Image: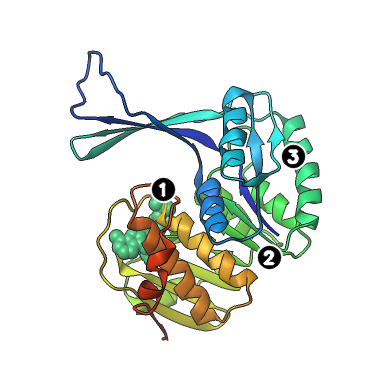
Amino acid sequence: MIVTITMNPSIDISYPLETFTLDTVNRVKNVHKTAGGKGLNVTRVLKQLEADVTASGLIGGVLGEAIKQDLDQTEIKHAFSSIKGETRNCIAVLHEGQQTEILESGPVVEPTEAAAFLQHFKKLAATAEILSFSGSLPEGLPTDFYSQMIQLCQSKPVVLDCSGAALQQVLQGKAKPLLIKPNNEELSDLLGKPIGKDPVELKEALSDPLFAGIEWIVVSLGAGGAFAKHNETFYQVTIPKIEVVNPVGSGDATVAGLIDAIAKGLSPEEILKHGNAMGMLNAQEATTGFVQLANYQNLVEQINVTSV
Ligand code: ATP
């Protein structure tokens, strides 16, 4: 079983408007609401890949219940831990080809709730084959919370997709994730200097002692594909040009592809192809965390993975 973790999920609301006018009333008809958060995007793609997946994390209040109902409707298994605070709404206003977002910071987690989650998580991790943690930590949790969670996994493989202090803490911690998937910007933030897409520069960046002990580092480069380090081997992943509809969540779809391939015991080249194919398939759809698998084979055949 694959366990996905979303510590600060949301109900994502999209408001399509022909024009968005400030300081007056804007009325909207076609409101779309879904369970959101990076880990839930990963979960949905894994479900489409027919993986045995269970979603977990923290939820609270009526919006927390709405997340459970949304997952039930798509027959996705879940095992969340409840908190007093209310799960958040995240609003995207789609107007005149633009997207204006209003993101609530979400609930503040109490120390007793954090401790209860860790107990719950330890039991869940014992039943998992591989785990993925995605997205930011809610307020109230210490920045080393993911690090504490990795320690509780007792050497089970963890795929981690987060940024900032939470990622720094994991990299400095003793228990290491199997794989991290920073994008260009996150990699630059980690190393405190801009890192471009040049393979020589990327090779040097991924050789930084900060990444010691991490088996897989996959740097996603948007339309530029990806660059990866697996043990001591570096890989350049080149992808064909595609027609993009909505690239939001492509990183999450990539993470789902990587986990699925790792769980199936595929080779490093196949893992990278599968991950990138999922990212591209997501970019070709309007809905975040949705992939049209009928296009899979055609895309995979056009992805090149070379060791550099
Ligand atoms: P997000 O935070 O929105 O989930 P990200 O920044 O983590 O995204 P990206 O590097 O943008 O991740 O995308 C992940 C993968 O998806 C890329 O490595 C690539 O395979 C595919 N992809 C993303 N954007 C495009 C694009 N415009 N054209 C082709 N493929 C894309």
- Of the residues shown, which amino acid type is indicated by label 1? Thr
Q: Is residue 266 found left or right of 30 in the rendered image?
A: right
Residue under numbered circle 2:
157
Check disc 2 and give the amino acid type: Pro
Vertical placement of residue 193 versus 14, above or below? below
Sequence-wise, the earlier of marks 1 and 2 is: 2
Q: Residue at x 48, y 28 (%)?
A: 89
Q: Which residue is mark 1?
A: 288
Identify the mark nearer the N-term, 2 or 3.
3
**Residue that appears at 64% across and 69% down:** 263
- Read off the residue under disc 3: 117
Q: Residue 151 in the image: x percent, y percent?
A: 75, 56
Classed neighbour count for the residue bearing mark 2: other residues with Cα under 10 Å, few (<14), some (14–19), many (≥20): many
Cα–Cα span, label 2 and label 3: 20 Å
- Residue type indicated by callout 3: Phe
Of marks 1 and 2, the one in the foreground: 1
Which residue is at 79% across, 61% downward? 154
Q: Nearer the viewer, residue 200 or 259?
A: 259
Query: Observer-nearest residue: 15 or 150?
Result: 15
Judged from the image, the secondary structure of the residue bearing numbered disc 2 is: loop
| Residue 13, percent from left and from top | 41, 31
Nearest the camera: 272 or 35? Answer: 35
Q: Quadrant of ligand 1?
A: bottom left
Give the CA separation, mark 3 to mark 1.
27 Å
Question: Residue 142's x, y, as percent?
Answer: 65, 40
